[in-house]
Image (cartoon, rainbow, N blue to C red):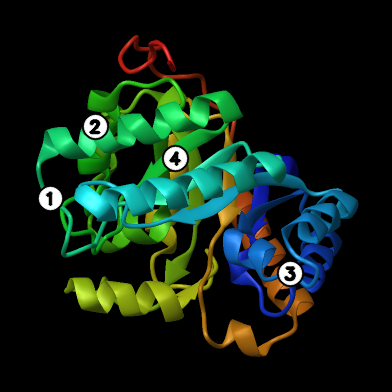
Amino acid sequence: MRLEDFGMDALTLPGPLDGKLDAIRRAGFSQVMLSAADLAGYPGGEDCAIRAVRKSGLRVTGLQVLREFEGLSGPLHDYKVGVAKSMLEMARAAAAPLLLVCSTTSPHASGDFDAQVADLRKLAMLAVPLRVRIAYEALSWGRFVDALPGAWALVQAADRANLGLAIDAFHFVASGTPLEALEEIYPGKLFLVQLSDFVGSAPASPEERRETARHLRVFPGEGSHSDRLAELIRAVDQIGYESDFSFEVFNDDYMQMSPSRVAERARRSLDWIVSRVSRRSLPVRRAASPAGTRRAD
């Protein structure tokens, strides 16, 4: 495994952006997944925040997160398209190669598959001239898409080169998604893997999943699902995944620690992963599929 394959989500760390960037760098990581809220709320504004990121020397993994996008209509759809355009512009300015998009939980959204596909296709097309990729993630409490197979079905149907998947280990484990679901995915369409664990058994209801995900995650190696996480990382390696891993760990206790101490936990977690999984050591197990790889325009 290579250290440069791993980074941290800024939202994992407490405090202002400058302290987060410094802690991530001092812990030995070379990349950061930025939060749009951190950039927009930075003293002096977005431009100053982006200068701080550049000064840190950290590579930007991506920008998060666009929520409740697909399946809306009328004024709500127009409103979300405007929000998406703003976030895409922010991603380009911050040199973020991808924008993370979560499956909708909105009570106003339609479950019509074709409408959802059309919306994701539109989002991908908006991103093309800005050279930003769209990474679509299934929330385990999503209204219509709550697991990897549903997200992959939409991405496949939308069929845009710059539209792919993000896998969040928490949602993968909490939803009980079988590892076999990864075998259906063309590895070039997997854009990001986010890592975390949690303590205790998998939460049964969507409400319990949401509560655990937002407040009770821990780093891999600290939780109750170590074997499952190691299997997931091995499995994405075996399908030929060659992009980034990012630690996304939302934990109320960590918010009461210094950024450096939280980043140190992330580095220990990386050491645990390296001791359990030998990445890049296995050949790509299947040939590249042509599905979902056509034009981006």
Task: State yes or no: discs 1 and 3 in contact (Cβ < 8 Å).
Answer: no
**Label of residue 224 in the image:** none
Residue identified by numbered label 3: 42
Q: In the rendered image, which quarter contains the C terminus?
A: top left
**In what element is the residue under mark 1?**
loop
Mark 2, mark 4: which one is toward the viewer?
Answer: 2
Amino acid type, residue under disc 1 in the picture:
Ser
**Label of residue 110 in the image:** 1
Is residue 72 visible to the viewer in this orientation of the structure? no
Task: State yes or no: discs 1 and 2 in contact (Cβ < 8 Å).
Answer: no
Neighbourhood count class around disc 3 (C-alpha, 10 Å): few under 14, some 14–19, many 20 upward? some
Labels 1 and 2: the sequence-earlier one: 1
Labels 4 and 1: the sequence-earlier one: 1
Residue identified by numbered label 4: 135
Labels 2 and 4: the sequence-earlier one: 2
Labels 3 and 4: the sequence-earlier one: 3
Labels 2 and 3: the sequence-earlier one: 3
Along the horizontal axis of the image, is 218 left or right of 46?
A: left
Q: Quadrant of residue 296?
A: top left
Name the spot of residue 178 as percent of width and height, x first.
Answer: 23, 46
